[in-house]
Amino acid sequence: MHAFDVLGDPVRRRILELLADGEKASGGVSTVIQAEFGISQPGVSQHLKVLRDNGFTTVRAEGARRLYAVRAEPLRDVDAWLDRFRRFWTPHLEALATEIARGKRRDR
């Protein structure tokens, strides 16, 4: 599966957002995802499996718990692909930063 196919799903993106703060137990991830998206625990498990099988997460056993964490490598590949397009928004963001700085100087 291509990285953007994996990331194209809002549930999987949300799981990665949760894991970006650090390793989390699958039960904790499931609780949040079930509440936010209204999907079953087996459904969440399938999304975790897709992320794991495509290298976006790692999983390790700790007793009966399964702890998931983000793997940076696939995200670096996505970032490298996006780098070709940064020229479209970088100048606008830099101009915005300049205007914000000017506004702060005027407010002093």
Image (spheres, rainbow, N blue to C red):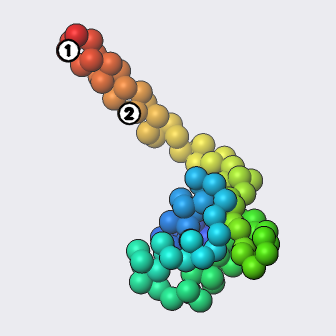
The local secondary structure at tag 1 comes to helix
Depicted 17 relative to depicted 88: above or below: below
Label 2, residues with CA under 10 Å away: few <14, some 14-19, many ≥20: few
Quick one: quadrant of the C terminus? Answer: top left
Q: In which quarter of the image is residue 98?
A: top left
Name the residue located 56 percent from the left edge and 71 percent from the top edge: 29
Residue of label 2: 92
- Residue drawn at (78%, 70%), measured in percent from left and top? 62
Position of the N terminus, as image quadrant, is bottom right
Q: Can residue 78 be seen in this view?
A: no
- At x 59%, y 54%, the residue is 20
User: Is tag 2's residue or tag 1's residue first in the polypeptide sequence?
Assistant: 2
**Residue at the limit of the structure toward the left, as seen here:** 107
Left or right: residue 83 compared with residue 58: left
Q: Nearer the viewer, mark 2 or mark 1?
A: 1
User: What amino acid type should be assigned to the residue bearing mark 1?
Assistant: Asp
Residue 31 seen anywhere in this rendered image of the structure:
yes
**Left or right position of 10 against 46:** left
Q: Which residue lies furthest to the front in this view?
A: 63
The disc label shown at residue 107, or none: 1
Disc 2 to disc 1: CB gap under 8 Å: no
Q: Which of 55 and 45 is in front in this view?
A: 45
Q: Determine the CA span between mark 2 and mark 1.
A: 23 Å
Say what amino acid the circle numbered 2 marks: His
Q: At x 63% / y 54%, what residue is drawn? A: 22
Q: Residue 103: image x %, image y %?
A: 24, 19
